[in-house]
């Protein structure tokens, strides 16, 4: 797995100079994951701070969009951040169960058939999580321990050493600059307000927060919402 150009741009924009090693760590984690799970198509390394989960880095924009769906409507990385154990899931089963519909539909739309979320510990404290995405069902079965050993220490060091300030990211993704984009955001805000039974101000905050936490633009997060509407979710 290699970062797409969009991911490279995001890393350049959001990471401080002191975080230069994070890019290399991400690539190393991706290579290790693929060596154990050949059908692994994506990885995100998240951090837990103030009871929130952020996507620190992801190997592709598609993975970041899947993470955004989790922040909008729940998902395994959020559960891991809340202290849950390792979660190994097939997206088809999630769709059948009606659990985490946004996450399941977005994953399926991007060719993901199974996911694995592993907690990242540092000195015994939960500081983040690794989210793995594979193109085959059951891709991670029987490999939890091996993946935890192969990825855990490096991920823990990267998260612990990273600059955790997300003000720059939040500012970068919060303001649309094109009228057409502004319209798509307003539509998404309306749909979120109806879906969650809340006011538009709260719904806009949800959309902006999900975008910032996943490392995608607010327009991309709005597209996730629209895709779910089109799919009947």
Image: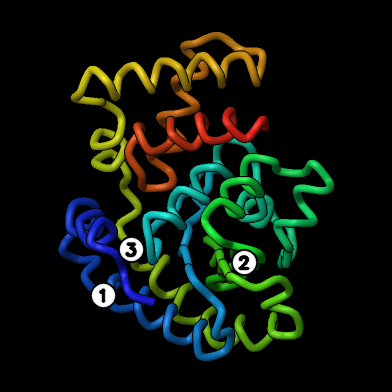
Tell me which numbered mark, 3 or 1, is placed earlier along the sequence: 1
Tell me which numbered mark, 2 or 3, is placed earlier along the sequence: 2
Q: At 73% from the left edge and 74% from the top edge, which residue is drawn?
A: 138
Tell me which numbered mark, 1 or 2, is placed earlier along the sequence: 1
Residue 87, placed above or below residue 180: below
Q: Nearer the viewer, mark 2 or mark 3?
A: 2
**Could you tell me how far apart the alpha carbons at marks 1 and 2 are, in whole angstroms?**
21 Å
Mark 3: few, some, or many residues within 10 Å (few <14, many ≥20)?
Answer: some
Dot 3 falls on a residue whose secondary structure is loop
Dot 1 falls on a residue whose secondary structure is helix
Q: How far across and down, in percent of the image, does residue 112 sit? A: 58, 62
Tag shown at residue 115 = none
What residue would you read off at disc 1? 21
Tag shown at residue 119 = 2
Q: How far across and down, in percent of the image, does residue 145 sit? A: 69, 85
Q: How far across and down, in percent of the image, does residue 13 sit? A: 18, 52
Q: Quadrant of the N terminus?
A: bottom left
């Amino acid at each position: 797995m290699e970062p797409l150009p969009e991911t490279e741009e995001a890393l350049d924009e959001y990471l401080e100079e002191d975080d230069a090693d994070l890019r290399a760590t991400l690539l190393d984690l991706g290579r290790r994951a693929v060596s154990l799970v050949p059908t692994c198509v994506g990885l995100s390394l998240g951090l837990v701070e103030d009871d929130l989960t952020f996507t620190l880095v992801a190997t592709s924009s598609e993975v970041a969009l899947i993470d955004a769906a989790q922040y909008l409507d729940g998902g395994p990385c959020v559960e891991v951040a809340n202290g849950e154990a390792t979660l190994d899931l097939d997206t088809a089963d999630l769709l059948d169960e009606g659990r985490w519909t946004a996450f399941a539909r977005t994953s399926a739309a991007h060719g993901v058939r199974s996911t694995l979320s592993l907690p990242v510990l540092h000195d015994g404290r939960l500081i983040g999580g690794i989210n793995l995405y594979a193109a085959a069902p059951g891709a991670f079965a029987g490999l939890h321990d091996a993946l935890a050993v192969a990825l855990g220490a490096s991920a823990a060091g990267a998260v612990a050493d990273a600059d955790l300030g997300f003000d720059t990211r939040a500012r970068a993704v919060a303001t649309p600059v094109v009228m057409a984009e502004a319209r798509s955001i307003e539509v998404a805000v309306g749909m979120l307000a109806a879906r969650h039974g809340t006011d538009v101000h709260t719904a806009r905050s949800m959309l902006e927060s999900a975008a910032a936490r996943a490392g995608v633009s607010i327009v991309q997060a709005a597209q996730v919402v629209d895709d779910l509407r089109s799919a009947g979710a």
